[in-house]
Image (tube, grey):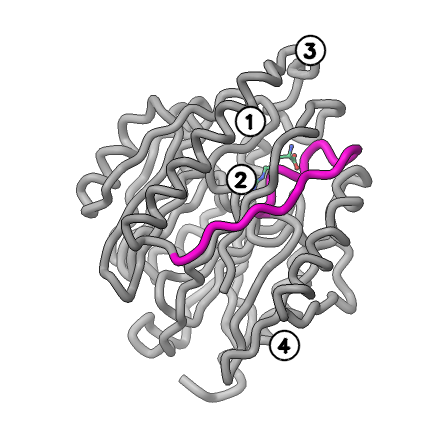
Amino acid sequence: MTSAENFKVYTTGKLPFTINDLKRREEPLQVLMCSPEYFDIIDVKNVHMEGMAQQLNKELALKQWSDLKFVYAQLLDQGLIEGLKIILGVKGCEDMVFCANQTFPWMGPNQKREVWMSRMRHPSRQREVPFFENYFLEMGYQPRHFAKTPLFEGMGDTIPHPGKLLLYGGYGHRSNKTAYEELSEQLSVPVIALELINENFYHLDTCFVPLSETQVMLCKEAFTEEGLALIHQCFEEVLEIPMEEAIATFCLNAHVVNNQKTNKKAAILQLGSVAAKAALNKCGYTIFEVETSEYMKSGGSVFCMKMMFF
Ligand code: ARG
């Protein structure tokens, strides 16, 4: 698919392409985590945070972060990922540990790496973004800024189709639809824009997990009828996870790693899910279960606690 008219945003109706028509896309294989020493729950930014300000066990939070880091170190040893980097948390940036949100890294034509800087909804989170801009500058990335979009929360809302040049963009809570108009134009990539209609699922990465070129697991209550109809055109198999499980265990914030070079697959997710675990098993994933209870009190789990980059 090369014609320019296909590099646009789709919100409803019949798609003019099939997944097979799309170009291949190289997956990022490096993991970035942000150290958690200043993680805290101060104000309520999402429904999961209600009443949680006094409930955080900080010592336990540090341990859970280290345990997650250890899982990524194992993935590195086993050839599933190619790098594991840490950016230092900053005092006064209590949510910086959720480093899926401040940026959207991208590999353009000719291996040109660029990174789109988020426009965070909450002022305390806006402070996090320059630290990531500097980090990626040092890594040789070209920072990119939105021209007409007030809200965009990085990979929290922007998730690629496995191995294909196609993006899914969540909007309604933390990102604006215009972000995807800008991204599709600037990156020459079609974007399926998905309105998120349930406050429990305020980022796309809380309700939508592509597993392979043909399979996705999701919570249908998070989406509109139009959105679900688009998703069904893009995946042969849509594995529905019950809403109660998705809310209670953040299982749709799992991080699935598909290494195209070694053909190895692993999934990391919060302990306690049943349906999501069964779906991951069925799709051939090696499963790593972790405890992220302290981060769930802030509305995040595994997927939010890392950034994938090139
Ligand atoms: N407390 C953070 C917020 O509300 C949690 C972010 C979770 N990240 C995610 N990718 N879902 O912004």
Left or right, 214 with respect to 192, comes to left
N-terminal of the two: label 3 or label 1? Answer: 3
N-terminal of the two: label 4 or label 1? Answer: 4
Left or right, 286 with respect to 168, comes to left
How packed is label 3: few (under 14 Cα within 10 Å), some, or many (20 or more)? few
Which residue matches tag 3?
A: 54
Q: Which of marks 4 and 1 is in front?
A: 1
How packed is label 1: few (under 14 Cα within 10 Å), some, or many (20 or more)? many
Rendered location of residue 44, percent (x, y): 72, 25
Which residue matches tag 2?
A: 305
| Kind of element beneath mark 1 | helix
Q: Which of 93 and 15 is in front in this view?
A: 93
Q: Which amino acid does label 2 sit on?
A: Met
How packed is label 4: few (under 14 Cα within 10 Å), some, or many (20 or more)? few
Magenta stretch mostly in which secondary structure? Answer: loop
Label 3 close to label 2 by CB (< 8 Å): no
Q: Nearer the viewer, residue 242 or 226?
A: 242
N-terminal of the two: label 2 or label 4? Answer: 4
Which residue matches tag 4?
A: 186
N-terminal of the two: label 3 or label 2? Answer: 3
Which residue matches tag 1?
A: 295
Label 3 close to label 4 by CB (< 8 Å): no
Label 2 close to label 4 by CB (< 8 Å): no
| Kind of element beneath mark 4 | helix
User: Quadrant location of ligand 1?
Assistant: top right
Which contiguous range is marked in magenta?
82-100
Would the CB of label 2 be found within 8 Å of ligand 1? yes
Rendered location of residue 291, percent (x, y): 42, 24
Q: In this view, does 270 lie above or below 188?
A: above
Q: Which amino acid does label 4 sit on?
A: Gln
Would the CB of label 4 be found within 8 Å of ligand 1? no
Q: Residue furthest top?
A: 54
